Amino acid sequence: MADLSGKTALVTGASRGIGRSIAERLAADGAEVAVHYGTNDAAAKEVVAAIGQGAVAIRAEFGTEDDVATLFAGVNSWLNGRKLDILVNNAGILGLTPLGQVGVEEFNQGYDVNVRAPFFIVQEALPLLSDGGRIVNVSTAVTRIAGPFVHYAMNKGAIDVMTRTLAQALGSRGITVNAVSPGVVDTDMGAWVHSSPDLESAIVSTIALGRLGRPDDVADIVGFLASDGARWVTGEVIDASGGQWLGPNAG
């Protein structure tokens, strides 16, 4: 565990899945955490209750008008003049529609949540972010692995580019910017993998470590990147897939 005592952290999409695990990990390391969520008030309150003192829930539905402004109205109220030390861009939506059936509305919604929102969140966060702060973006291994989720992979490819570009731009302030790229993680968002036993076993057979990912597998990497131990790591996109699709299964 790292020591994040006295640090403040904003985690987007933190009411469930990977985001919740990240929020809980940063809080366990001592940070005060703003738990952003879109619509599920009950889930967000559950996370805040689980974390305890220092946590607050902030609602803002990405992909709607004034979404980022709404988020930062809450963030600024919570910070109350303090600096933000850690920003984790985790919120995202996964579109399962095949390429030939993706309509303009679905394409735009994915872009708004997965690309536009993180971009403008960073823009709003920069004046608040402390020198020596941390930005961690949650990407996906499907930017490396060709798969059926084309528009989603395109969105996250933009996040990878933003990560490297920001790392260069913010280095003079000592701010590190990195991304974590999960493979298939056993969450609500990844529930499609359980749609049939054959599908699940087929997916697991492509993973070198022989199991589906867990939210804490990703959260522990984010915890490291948010810590002083990662002070010399920036501009990196770290694969967190358990070695998915590294090559033919030798087992």
Image (cartoon, helix red, strand yellow):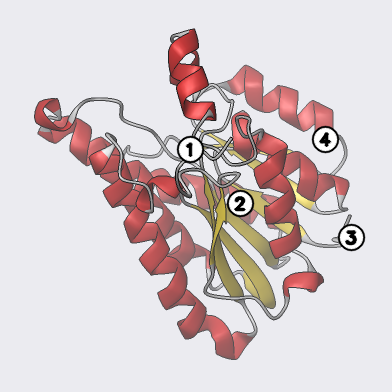
Placement of the C terminus among the 4 image quadrants: top right
Which is closer to the viewer, label 1 or label 3? 3
- Neighbourhood count class around disc 4 (C-alpha, 10 Å): few under 14, some 14–19, many 20 upward: many
Pick whichever, 46 or 236, lies toward us.
236
For badge 3, the amino acid type reads: Ser
Marks 4 and 2: in contact by CB < 8 Å?
no
Marker disc for residue 60 = 1
Estimate the x, y position of residue 10 in percent, counting from the top left: 64, 52
For badge 2, the amino acid type reads: Val
Q: Residue at x 78, y 66 (%)?
A: 227
CA–CA distance in space, label 1 to label 3 = 27 Å
Q: Is residue 211 above or below residue 12?
A: above
For badge 4, the amino acid type reads: Ile
CA–CA distance in space, label 1 to label 4 = 20 Å
Residue identified by numbered label 3: 5
Q: Earlier in the sequence, mark 3 or mark 4?
A: 3
